[in-house]
Image (tube, rainbow, N blue to C red):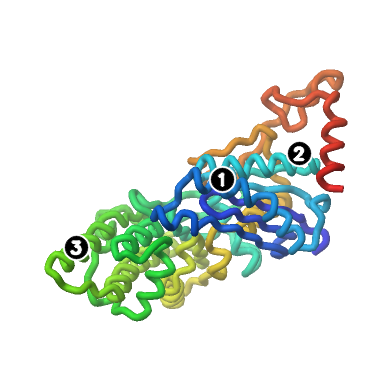
């Protein structure tokens, strides 16, 4: 274990400041500072509020993770950070912090993909990923089916939502039912006491001519909202538990049906489910039932690793180090629409240069620091991490 890469991961794509420390595929620390309570009164995530919360939480959360892991920042073999996709301002806070720590420590920097990280986190619980891995990622911003022959370099999108993501639909229906934010956990809880067959809500994009692996939850959301409105207009009581159960069943039915179909079509005998909605109890149970029937092995991380966290970023970063993937340049930028086909953002090889000129370590685009500033770099490291 001592020979495996020790990596710190920073995740700030949305409303949670996550910092994880991983050695190989072993989780040493997973520290999270959530700003969800600050967004609750708005009924959704406010980007500027999230960015400011990340700024306040970043250093304390990193320090907490290092202490929890029992390691020094100097011991790290690399620092990984979510470069995208996500909220631009929130991502920028994490990327800036990671660059500062990596530069001050003299460690390689790895800008990684949020979605690929959600897949890789399963290694921390169930061991190395099979290759290829079929992944169903479901969260507030994403509903995707991905085939990953190599999680560090080859992730292929098979299908995605064409409108609302599954988690977004949960939040919107919870708002209509006046259940607060976030909607996923409360709907899951109420659904356990309801009848999933009480109301026949539609299953989007499940017709014979519809795209096999794409998702659509906008029509379902509208159908549920209109059903509730009709009940209220008629002066009837809305059976909240039955609505929650029937809506939830419509979502997880489509998700699991398409995921199983993708596994069969691609000849893959493992299915990994990740993302915040993967914490949903009905999704987990129905997926297990259908995977058992199809002879497919299901891998789902524990709920705490399904939601956004730094451990997943560290896990992918450790895999990058292990497989000798190129580190990112110092001019790494946040990319709110980073495609899943880019598991990480590698650096560009710097051109050969005269050693008497500016050193170009990590500055392939001509923004390097001169040797005259090296003493400042060294002082910074001593002051910050002595």
Q: Quadrant of residue 219?
A: bottom left
Q: Give left or right: position of 242 versus 301.
A: left
Asked if marks 1 and 3 touch (Cβ < 8 Å), the reply is: no
Residue at mark 1 to residue at mark 3: CA–CA distance: 37 Å
Q: Position of residue 81 (x, y in %)?
A: 64, 47
Q: Is residue 197 above or below residue 121?
A: below
Secondary element at tag 1: helix
Q: Position of residue 116 (x, y in %)?
A: 56, 52
Which label's residue is closer to the chain start, 1 or 3? 1
The quadrant in which the N terminus is found is bottom right
Q: Nearer the viewer, mark 2 or mark 1?
A: 1
Asked if marks 2 and 3 touch (Cβ < 8 Å), the reply is: no
Q: Residue at x 31, y 62 (%)?
A: 173
Numbered tag placed on residue 103 in the rendering = 2
Q: Residue at x 32, y 55 (%)?
A: 216
Q: Residue at x 21, y 65 (%)?
A: 228
Q: Give left or right: position of 234 versus 378.
A: left
Which label's residue is closer to the chain start, 2 or 3? 2
Provide the residue designation for mark 1. Answer: 52
Q: Position of residue 182 (x, y in %)?
A: 43, 61
**Dot 2: within a 10 Å radius of its alpha carbon, few (fewer than 14), some, or many (20 or more) residues?**
some
Provide the residue designation for mark 3. Answer: 229
Secondary element at tag 2: helix
Q: Residue furthest left?
A: 234
Q: Position of residue 339 (x, y in %)?
A: 50, 43
Examine the rendering and report whether any part of residue 326 can be seen.
no
Residue at mark 2 to residue at mark 3: CA–CA distance: 56 Å
Secondary element at tag 3: helix
Closer to the camera in the image, 240 or 346: 240
Examine the rendering and report whether any part of residue 111 can be seen.
yes
**Dot 3: within a 10 Å radius of its alpha carbon, few (fewer than 14), some, or many (20 or more) residues?**
some
């Amino acid at each position: 274990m001592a020979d495996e890469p020790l990596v710190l991961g920073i995740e700030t794509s949305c409303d949670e400041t996550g910092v994880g420390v991983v050695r190989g595929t072993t989780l040493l620390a997973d520290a999270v500072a959530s700003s969800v309570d600050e967004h609750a009164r708005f009924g959704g995530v406010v980007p500027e509020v999230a960015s400011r919360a990340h700024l306040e939480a970043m250093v304390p959360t990193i320090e907490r993770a290092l202490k929890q892991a029992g390691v020094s920042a100097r011991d790290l073999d690399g620092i990984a950070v979510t470069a995208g996709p996500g909220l631009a301002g929130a991502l920028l806070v994490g990327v800036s912090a990671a660059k500062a720590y990596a530069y001050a420590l003299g460690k390689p920097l790895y800008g990684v993909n949020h979605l690929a990280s959600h897949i890789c986190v399963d290694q921390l619980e169930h061991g190395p990923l099979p290759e290829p891995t079929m992944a169903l990622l479901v969260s507030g911003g994403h509903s995707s089916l991905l085939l990953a022959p190599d999680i560090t370099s080859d992730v292929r999108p098979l299908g995605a939502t064409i409108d609302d993501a599954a988690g977004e639909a949960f939040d919107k229906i919870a708002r209509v039912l006046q259940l607060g934010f976030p909607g996923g956990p409360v709907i899951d809880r109420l659904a356990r006491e309801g009848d999933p067959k009480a109301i026949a809500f539609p299953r989007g994009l499940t017709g014979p001519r519809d795209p096999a692996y794409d998702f659509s939850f906008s029509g379902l959301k509208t159908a549920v909202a209109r059903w509730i409105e009709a009940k209220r207009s008629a002066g009837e009581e809305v059976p909240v538990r039955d609505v929650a159960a029937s809506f939830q069943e419509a979502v997880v039915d489509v998700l699991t049906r398409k995921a199983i179909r993708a596994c069969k079509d691609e000849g893959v005998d493992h299915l990994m489910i990740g993302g915040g909605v993967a914490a949903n109890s009905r999704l987990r149970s129905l997926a297990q039932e259908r995977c058992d029937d199809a002879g497919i092995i299901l891998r789902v991380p524990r709920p705490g690793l399904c939601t956004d966290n730094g451990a997943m970023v560290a896990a992918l970063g450790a895999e990058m180090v292990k497989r000798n993937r190129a580190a990112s340049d110092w001019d790494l930028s946040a990319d709110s629409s980073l495609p899943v086909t880019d598991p990480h953002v590698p650096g560009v090889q710097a051109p050969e240069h005269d050693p008497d000129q500016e050193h170009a370590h990590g500055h392939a685009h001509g923004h390097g620091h001169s040797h005259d500033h090296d003493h400042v770099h060294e002082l910074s490291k001593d002051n910050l991490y002595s």
